[in-house]
């Protein structure tokens, strides 16, 4: 599953609505609770564990993909 | 070979070459299918066109699994989400719908775009019948329902999705969507979550768990770490929310922050005492304003172990010993308060298959404590409190015999051959029977509904040495070859309870399906295949939980057994009158006093059949009624020569004017047919006359279930004065006398 598809699933959107620039500013569902849920789902889907600093910077789909890549995750 | 390898192998071939290659060999051949796979990657349109052109051959020659894979790949290989792809998707749907795998179907439907169109929606319906639990299909169906503003369907689908995919993202999505859409069903229970830590993500799971038992919740999550002011402050959000039930989770780590350090034994003791006092002060404040509203409190759980590691247990005050002591004292204190329950958080988390009660990472980044994997378990535990609160508690567990309470078939294996005893296979069934036997302590009944030769089965029940449940454990027995739903109705009639008060436990999926089809109001339990899991499955059922226990509950099985004896007497008596006299019925009528409030509240909550108005009142309201001089609340207890029925009838009467007004009049259906209701009514009229009243009025509010009370007022000389919809108003001029039934001995001692 691509990060876009996962983000779409967590927030109940169509994958076509999600792009690199999708962020809490563009997606109202992506609030603080939504962010924690997203982190939990990303960690379980890609079998990675993010540091607290990373979780704070992962505030766009592009940033999420970067963080995933830096931990060697593939999709 | 994976598709990419096939594609590589054919990389030098163009689309035309590939199609050419296909025509040279029979489709059933593996190499032809490899070519098709390659084609699906490089030229998805041509590939799908080929499938459509050769529909008959393809279905005959290519396995559905392989075909689904090819279609999946093709659908994903279009470079653009364009009209060509949509066109193929709808054709594929038309021709290959019934052979597609769930994954291929989802990809093809996805290619149809946001608007599926009528044929796409019809295809979706058919696919949902084949794959009812496929999350991706459910998500598409949800989108369709959303587009159509079909909120009833949307709500059902969201519950199905939450159950099919229990991950935090999906459950939170379902919950969020529900809040955004106009609800089709009004909320039936108001649930508040109050906590010292972030518990918002639990709300979505509680919502889902409530809906799976048919309850529509309105949820309130108190602001972060404001548990004490939320409960104490009269202007708080919680107080304004007016909850029906409150769940309070306060972490001991929040109350005693020193726990992450290494406090001395003395400091531990002092801070433990202070923490306990703090929480009890808040709880006591709650019980003062919430008047009988159930409060469920998480037991104390610490994320930290003691500083000495494995040496802790040698300490005078070990960390775990200290915590256990604190929980014991909390339990004891809560027992003295009305409607307060301790929820063992470790048990809640583990019984539902969760793992831990604390997640260090989430505690740090989000002030959460419960790990996502445990939320479902905790929510399901919550619902065990919500179910009895909403009167969903069933009254009788109806059991199959073969492979349900013992292993094997007694008709084939014989009494000696069935599996039942102290070693496995067989010990699973003993363990299950022991649990079923304990249900009588909650006031629940057991019955048998089984297809066997009665002699074989009864011989096992009476004489098998390992049987726990003997004949006397069952309040009704139907062992015959009739359809089980028919037996179910007979059991309900014999026990004088509704069919919707029955739980059906049977290992056979066909019997379960038939029961669900014909008697959907029966709770048919989805029993796991493995008998070792029978006990825990039934243990977890929310519909077998009760919030209070009365002496009537403890002896109910016995009461129904004496009812059976009574039934036999009934048959031999010459006339009804003689029969009733032979019962030697004695009743006591009295104003309700504090000791009987729980039983009175239970009658108000549970009585459906002989209930004239079906108003539900809780202990707090009952207390107010008794304190109010313009109201009288009488209770009736009865017994006969076979046994004590306990407190079986209640009436609430407004006595402020010359015309007394019966607000509520209800009686346990166990004692219908003995003239007990007439006795209570005769008593009320006598009281009214003595007080100088001139008339007695009352309402009959028709419900689905209270037909037994239907002609009650007419029967006793009341005149109908008004009927508005399901509400009829009746009046009795007190010049008319309501006679006391001659066979009932009345003992009224009233102030």
Image (spheres, rainbow, N blue to C red):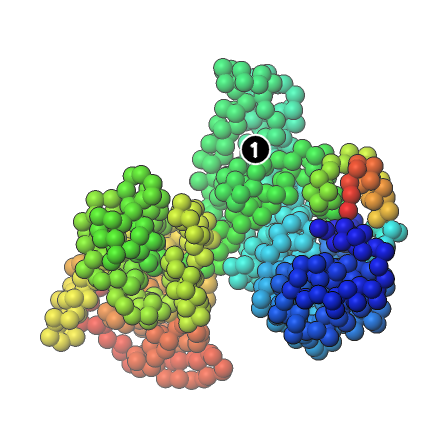
Quick one: B307 or B44, which is closer to the camera? B44
Quick one: B248 or B137, which is closer to the camera? B137
Q: x%, y% of residue B89?
A: 75, 70
* Label 1 packing within 10 angstroms: few (<14), some (14-19), many (20+): many
Residue displayed at 83% across by 64% down = B17
| Residue B606 appears in the figure | no
Which residue in the rendered view is the most extreme toward the right?
Answer: A21
Residue displayed at 21% across by 62% down = B454
Q: x%, y% of residue B564?
A: 21, 62
Q: x%, y% of residue B610?
A: 35, 70
Residue displayed at 53% across by 15% down = B311
Quarter of the view holding residue A59: top right
Quick one: B626 or B225, which is closer to the camera? B225
Say left or right for B678 vs B7: left
Residue displayed at 70% across by 34% down = B361
Q: x%, y% of residue B732?
A: 35, 80
Q: Chain of mark 1?
A: B
Residue for badge 1: B301
Say left or right for A54 vs B234: right
Say left or right for B374 vs B739: right
**Secondary structure of the residue carrying numbered label 1:** loop
């Amino acid at each position: 599953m691509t990060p876009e598809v996962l983000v779409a699933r967590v927030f109940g959107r169509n994958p076509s609505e999600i792009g690199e620039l999708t962020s809490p500013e563009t997606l109202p569902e992506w609030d603080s609770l939504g962010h924690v849920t997203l982190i939990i789902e990303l960690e379980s889907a890609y079998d990675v564990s993010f540091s607290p600093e990373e979780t704070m910077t992962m505030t766009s789909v592009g940033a999420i993909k970067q963080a995933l890549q830096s931990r060697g995750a593939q999709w | 070979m994976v598709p990419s390898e096939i594609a590589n192998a054919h990389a030098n071939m163009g689309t035309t070459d590939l199609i050419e290659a296909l025509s040279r060999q029979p489709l059933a051949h593996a190499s032809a299918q490899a070519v098709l796979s390659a084609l699906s990657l490089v030229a998805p349109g041509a590939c799908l066109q080929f499938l459509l052109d050769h529909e008959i051959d393809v279905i005959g020659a290519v396995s559905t699994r392989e075909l689904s894979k090819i279609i999946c790949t093709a659908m994903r290989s279009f470079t653009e989400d364009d009209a060509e792809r949509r066109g193929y998707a709808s054709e594929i749907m038309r021709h290959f719908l019934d052979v597609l795998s769930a994954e291929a179907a989802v990809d093809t439907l996805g290619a149809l775009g946001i608007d599926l169109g009528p044929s796409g929606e019809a295809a979706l319906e058919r696919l949902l019948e084949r794959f009812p639990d496929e999350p991706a299909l459910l998500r598409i169906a949800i989108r369709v329902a959303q587009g159509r503003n079909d909120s009833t369907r949307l709500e059902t689908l969201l519950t199905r999705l939450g159950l099919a995919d229990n991950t935090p993202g999906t459950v939170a999505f379902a919950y969020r969507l529900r809040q955004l859409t106009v609800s089709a069903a009004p909320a039936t229970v108001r649930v508040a979550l109050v906590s010292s830590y972030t518990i918002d993500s639990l709300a979505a799971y509680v919502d889902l768990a409530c809906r799976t038992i048919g309850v529509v919740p309105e949820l309130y999550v108190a602001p972060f770490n404001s548990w004490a002011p939320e409960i104490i402050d009269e202007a708080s959000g919680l107080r304004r929310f007016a909850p029906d039930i409150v769940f309070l989770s306060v972490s001991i780590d929040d109350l005693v922050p020193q726990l992450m350090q290494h406090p001395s034994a003395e400091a531990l003791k002092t801070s433990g005492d202070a923490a306990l006092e703090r929480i009890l002060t808040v709880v006591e404040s709650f019980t003062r304003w919430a008047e009988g509203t159930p409060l469920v409190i998480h037991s104390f759980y610490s994320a930290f172990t003691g500083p000495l590691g494995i040496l802790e247990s040698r300490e005078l005050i070990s960390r775990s010993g200290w915590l256990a002591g604190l929980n014991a004292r909390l339990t004891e204190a809560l027992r003295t308060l009305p409607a307060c329950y301790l929820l063992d958080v470790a048990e809640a988390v583990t019984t539902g298959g969760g793992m831990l009660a604390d997640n260090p990472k989430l505690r740090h980044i989000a002030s959460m404590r419960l790990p996502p994997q445990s939320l479902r378990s905790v929510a399901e535990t919550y619902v065990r409190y919500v179910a009895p609160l909403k009167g969903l508690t069933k009254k009788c567990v109806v059991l199959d015999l073969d492979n349900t309470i013992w292993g094997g078939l007694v008709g084939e294996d014989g009494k000696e051959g069935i599996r039942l005893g102290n070693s496995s296979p067989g010990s699973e069934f003993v363990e299950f029977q022991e649990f079923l036997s304990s249900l009588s302590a909650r006031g629940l009944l057991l019955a048998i509904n089984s297809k066997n030769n009665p002699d074989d089965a009864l011989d096992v029940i009476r004489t098998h040495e390992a049987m726990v449940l003997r004949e006397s454990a069952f309040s009704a027995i139907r062992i015959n070859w009739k359809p089980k739903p028919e037996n179910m109705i007979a059991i309900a009639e014999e026990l004088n309870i509704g069919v919707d008060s029955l739980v059906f436990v049977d290992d056979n999926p066909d019997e379960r399906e038939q029961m669900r089809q014909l008697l959907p109001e029966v709770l048919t339990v989805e029993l796991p295949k493995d008998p070792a899991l029978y006990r825990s499955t039934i243990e977890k059922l929310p519909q077998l939980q009760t919030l209070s226990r009365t002496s009537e509950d403890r002896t109910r099985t016995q009461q129904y057994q004496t009812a059976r004896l009574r039934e036999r007497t009934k048959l031999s008596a010459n006339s009804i009158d003689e029969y009733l006299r032979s019962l030697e019925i004695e009743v006591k009528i009295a104003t309700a006093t504090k000791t009987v409030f729980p039983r009175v509240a239970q009658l108000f909550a549970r009585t459906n059949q002989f209930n004239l108005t079906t108003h539900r009142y809780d202990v707090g309201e009952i207390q107010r009624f008794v304190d109010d001089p313009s109201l009288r609340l009488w209770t009736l207890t009865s017994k006969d020569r076979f046994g004590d029925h306990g407190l079986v009838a209640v009436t609430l009467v407004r006595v402020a004017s010359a015309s007394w007004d019966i607000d509520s009049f209800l009686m346990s259906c166990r004692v219908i047919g003995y003239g007990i209701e007439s006795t209570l009514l005769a008593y009320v009229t006598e009281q009214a006359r003595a007080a100088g009243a001139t008339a007695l009025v009352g309402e009959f509010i028709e419900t689905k279930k209270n037909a037994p009370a239907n002609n009650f007022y007419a029967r006793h000389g009341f005149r109908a004065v008004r009927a508005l919809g399901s509400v009829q108003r009746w009046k009795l001029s007190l010049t008319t006398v309501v006679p006391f039934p001659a066979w009932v001995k009345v003992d009224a001692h009233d102030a």
